[in-house]
Image: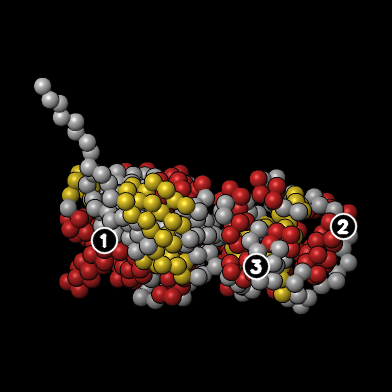
Amino acid sequence: MSTVTLTEPKQELKIVEDATCTFCGCVCDDITLKVEGDKITEAKSACILGKSWFFNHQHEGGPACLIEGRPASVEEGIERAARILAEARYPIIYGLSDTTSEAQRVAVSIGDWIGGCVDTTTSVCHGPSGIAFQDVGEVTCTLGEIKNRGDLIIFWGSNPAESHPRHFTKYSLTPKGTYVPRGRKDRYCVLVDVRKTKSARAADLFIQIKPRKDFEALWALRALAKGVELDAAEIEAETGVPLATWQGLMERMKRAKYGVILFGMGLTMTRGKHLNSYALLALARDMNAHTRFVCKPMRGHGNVTGADNVVTWRTGYPFAVNLARGYPRFNPGEYTTTDTLGRGEADAALIIASDPMANFTQAAREHLARIPYIALDPKDTPTTRAATVVFHTATYGINTPGTVYRMDDVPIPLRPAFASPFPTDEAVLRGIERRVRALKSEG
């Protein structure tokens, strides 16, 4: 008696060169992916976070749309979503940092049609920096310039070893550049933080300041840059660091040929917030009286920089924009999503590629749960579970093409690895926009 052995059909193997990782703001675009069917089996050159991003975005199955927890067609979901937004008196749009710039443009258009607030995840991370940019300006650069020119690299309130693992090796510390041909040997690295993180191991100098004393430390450096005499006892009492250490750092900063300051949420989300960012940006500006100095924020989400750019193109402001009067108004604290929800003002919401139910304040989460809202996300999250209408969408960069912006405002194209059975964020948002326009014209 013969036996038959059943074998699974062999998956088609595909190699995607120069794929883009959209996990963090580095947006590394030199990844080589090995794809078998709808599964990525290898991500060459990706860091540990990038590999986790690529390997854990297979299709989860299930319906593309849910309305009040029940499966529905995408068309039905678009109709319900459009009516929720068109009939609301104070609708809000939030998220945008993990989707393409093409989808972001459509989201802002929807906000214009419904007269709502448009806000991004910037408001809970580098929002203070956005406010400071408007006051001070930004002495800016690209990551390529840092790689090829930077000989003094200062990280302030940032831990790239854990948050941006390839930043050291690809841009800021170890790569050989045009004017730093020996790579790490030609660079001096300083880390300023309130605690000794893993990034401190890579630094030549670690300065541990007192918590919530960033502004005082930066103002002391500004004074030293301008030749102002300071009281040693007072500076150490305020910052927790001897004046001699700050003087030594300032001397090194003045000697640098191309100084770079990269700052993170350890600076922007502590006491002082936008004033901290103001002080750092002003310090970079002051240093240009002595040598070339630049300053850049370390951005987290893959396209949060794109969200800032797109919202600014369309409205003139990067986040916390209210369009209710037919023209944009900018007011963080009044139009930021944590506040409109926390005060119980919003009566409908469109949440795109973000998870406020997992990280907002209790008051904001409770109010969001009380109002009808729409959520777009490739994954099942606390936010999608409580949404009135859910669209499970394709993952940007893995399933969909488009454009994202690296943390230095450089646009990067996406090269998808495999197709998804789910719609893209852009397709869903364009459908909602069409129905909203039709409903508003009927009204």
Of 59 and 386, the residue lying toward us: 59
Identify the mark at residue 364; answer none if there is no mark: none
* Residue 267 located left or right of residue 422: right
Measured as percent of width and height from the top left, residue 110 is found at 31, 67
Outermost residue toward the left? 1
Q: Quadrant of the C terminus?
A: bottom left
Circle 2/circle 1 CB separation < 8 Å: no
The residue tagged 3 is 177
Cα separation, mark 3 vs mark 2, equals 32 Å
Instruction: Tell me if residue 348 can be seen.
Output: no
Q: Which mark is residue 428?
A: 1
Q: Earlier in the sequence, mark 2 or mark 1?
A: 2
Alpha-carbon distance for marks 1 and 3? 43 Å
Q: Amino acid at mark 1?
A: Val
Kindly report which numbered mark, 3 or 2, lies closer to the viewer in this rendering.
Answer: 3
Marks 2 and 1, how far apart in space? 58 Å
The residue sitting at 23% across, 64% down in the picture is 431
Above or below for 208 versus 93: above
Name the foreground residue: 261 vs 127. Answer: 261
Q: Secondary structure at mark 2?
A: helix
Kindly identify the residue that appears in the image at 15 percent across and 29 percent down: 4
The answer to whether residue 289 of the structure is visible from this angle is yes
51, above or below 280, in the image: above
Kind of residue sitting beneath label 3:
Gly
Q: In x, y percent, where is residue 364?
A: 43, 49
Q: Which one is in front, 255 or 439?
A: 255
- Judge left or right: residue 279 versus residue 47: right
Badge 3 crowding class, 10 Å Cα cut-off, few under 14, some 14 to 19, many 20 or more, is: many
Where residue 244 is drawn, which disc sits there? 2
What residue type is disc 2 on? Ala
Expressed as whole percent of the image width and height from the top left, the position of residue 204 reads 76, 54
In this view, 9 is above or below 292: above
